[in-house]
Image (cartoon, rainbow, N blue to C red):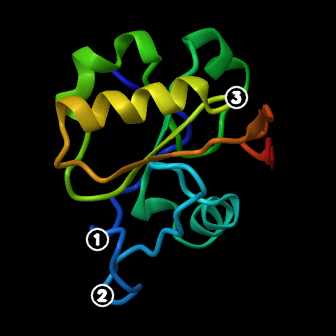
Amino acid sequence: MAKAHGSPAPGAAGDAKSKPSGGAVQIEPGKEKGTLSIASFDRLLKETPDAVLLVDTRDEKEFKRAAIKGSINIPIEQLEKKLNTLPADKPIIFVCGTGGRSGEAYDMVKLLRSQLTAYFLDADLKFNPDGTYTVKPH
């Protein structure tokens, strides 16, 4: 079972590609296929964190040390078994420290549950024990 960090409340459903009206989420794509821009990531977590599911693909020990508030932990090696637990009614954003494991998670979802709206953050992400983060482009 995924471990929650904080208490993610049920969020508004929405098509990530639609305009932000009626609860929909606007996600700006990044440079690589499947990524979202750092600016979009920051804006979503600041303005509408409940409108997306943030999945941290790092291992459980890393997640327990520090994680983004509201994220859940599904280590990459457990993701395939837990794909059916991911929601189809909101965008999913995969994160890790560098984009490697989160990119692998994105590829797995697109291969095995292509109907899901998924993205990953391809950047250097530092997790802080207080639930905050800092992010830098590669």
Residue 100 at x, y percent in the picture: 59, 25
Give the residue pinned by disc 2: 22
Mark 1, residues whose alpha carbon is within 10 Å: few (<14), some, or many (≥20)?
A: many
Question: In terms of depth relative to the viewer, which is nearer, 3 or 32?
Answer: 32
Which quarter of the image is occupied by the N terminus? top left
Separation (CA) of disc 3 from disc 1? 27 Å
- How far, Cα to Cα, is label 2 from label 1? 8 Å
The alpha-carbon separation of the residues under discs 2 and 3 comes to 33 Å
Circle 1: residue type: Gly
Question: Which residue was labeled with disc 1?
Answer: 14
Tell me where residue 76 appears, x and y as whole percent: 45, 17
Q: Secondary structure at mark 3?
A: loop
Instruction: Name the kind of residue labelled 3 in the image.
Output: Gly
User: In which image quadrant can residue 64 be found?
Assistant: top right
Q: Secondary structure at mark 2?
A: loop
Query: Residue 47 at what x, y percent from top left?
Result: 59, 73
Q: Nearer the viewer, mark 2 or mark 3?
A: 3
Q: In this picture, is 16 found above or below 22?
A: above
Q: Is residue 134 visible?
A: no
Q: Is residue 55 visible?
A: yes
- State whether residue 61 is above or below residue 35: above
Count all numbered tags in the image, as a single digit: 3
Residue name at image x 63 percent, y 60 percent: 37
